[in-house]
């Protein structure tokens, strides 16, 4: 008996996840339990789960909880039949084709009062919006967010490390405008998985007045390298 075509194109780690669901019988399972039950590394799990989600064999129920779709249940049934009818020493191996790393889009947002109040400390919020459906990641992306202010205190760079997943995330900084007519705030994002390369950023010039105005948000799209699925099959 031949390995079903829908399964042959999957990476071996994805096939092991399907086997795990077939043996487990649960409707939905947390990522940690799948990783342990299918005997995978975190990288192997990330590589596999993306292919299963992309091929509509699995979907995410909640925070790192996955379930089989109707197509997934059919694939599990076909795999169980194949395993039942084929001796272990005669089973085919899936042979995925390696491709370049995947990049996902994230929107970085800076929010601050406009105008800012002279000599009055203000919270400056830097964060990332939620992922679009096409840019979902299976493992966190680790970035360093740098905030640089001009004509304000501190003028020295402020920085924070963030883990970017699929939900919004934000970091609060404090900036005190000096006695100038404007303040420049600049955000730079460095991705740790990409050897610390700059992923991009944005800057804004905000007016300074006696009293602060309401918060205004500014955004820019960045491309981050998703390394969890290096060398996965199309």
Image: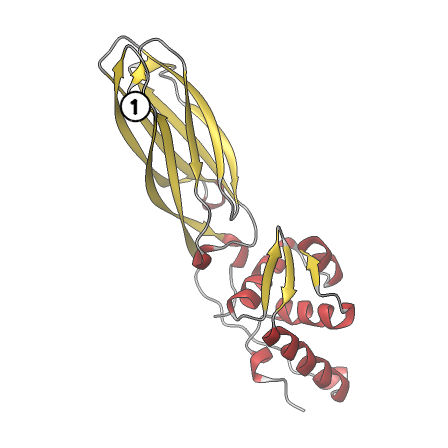
Task: Decide which of 131, 213 is in the foreground and name it.
Answer: 213
| Quarter of the image where one finds residue 81 | bottom right
Disc 1 crowd rating (10 Å Cα; few below 14, some 14-19, many 20+) is some
Point 56% across, 76% down: residue = 95
**Residue 35 quadrant:** bottom right
Q: Relative to residue 117, is residue 42 drawn left or right?
A: right
List x then y, in percent, for residue 222: 36, 45
- Left of 190 or right of it: where is 52? right
Residue 6, image x and y in percent?
Answer: 56, 80
Give coordinates of residue 107: x percent, y percent.
38, 44
Q: Residue at x 52, y 65 (%)?
A: 232
Task: State how many labels appear.
Answer: 1
Identify the residue at horizontal 64%, vertical 60% (top origin): 66
Q: Residue at x 64, y 79 (%)?
A: 74
Under tag 1, what secondary structure? loop
State which quadrant residue 123 falls in: top left
Q: Is residue 153 above or below residue 58?
A: above
Q: Quadrant of the N terminus?
A: bottom right
Q: Residue furthest bottom?
A: 1
- Colour scheme of the picture: secondary structure
Q: What residue is pinned by disc 1?
A: 114
Using the image, determine if residue 54 lies above or below residue 224: below
Which one is nearer the viewer's eye here, 107 or 148?
107
């Amino acid at each position: 008996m031949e390995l079903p075509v829908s399964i042959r194109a999957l990476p071996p780690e994805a096939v092991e996840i399907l086997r795990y669901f077939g043996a487990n019988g649960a409707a939905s399972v947390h990522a940690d339990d799948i990783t342990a039950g299918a005997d995978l590394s975190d990288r192997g799990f990330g590589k596999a789960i993306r292919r299963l989600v992309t091929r509509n064999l699995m979907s995410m129920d909640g925070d790192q909880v996955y379930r089989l779709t109707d197509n997934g249940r059919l694939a599990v049934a076909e795999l169980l039949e194949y395993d039942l009818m084929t001796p272990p020493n005669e089973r085919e191996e899936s042979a995925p084709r390696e491709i370049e790393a995947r990049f996902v889009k994230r929107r970085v947002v800076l929010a601050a009062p406009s105008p800012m109040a002279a000599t009055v400390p203000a919270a400056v919020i830097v964060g990332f919006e939620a992922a679009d459906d096409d840019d979902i990641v299976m493992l966190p992306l680790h970035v360093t967010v740098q905030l640089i202010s001009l004509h304000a205190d501190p003028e020295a760079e402020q920085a924070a490390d963030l883990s970017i997943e699929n939900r919004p995330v934000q970091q609060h900084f404090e900036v005190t405008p000096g006695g100038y007519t404007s303040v420049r705030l600049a955000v730079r994002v460095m991705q740790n998985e990409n050897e610390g390369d700059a992923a991009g950023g944005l800057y804004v010039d905000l007016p300074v007045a006696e009293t602060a105005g309401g918060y205004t948000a500014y955004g820019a799209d960045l491309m981050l390298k998703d390394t969890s699925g290096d060398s996965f099959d199309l």
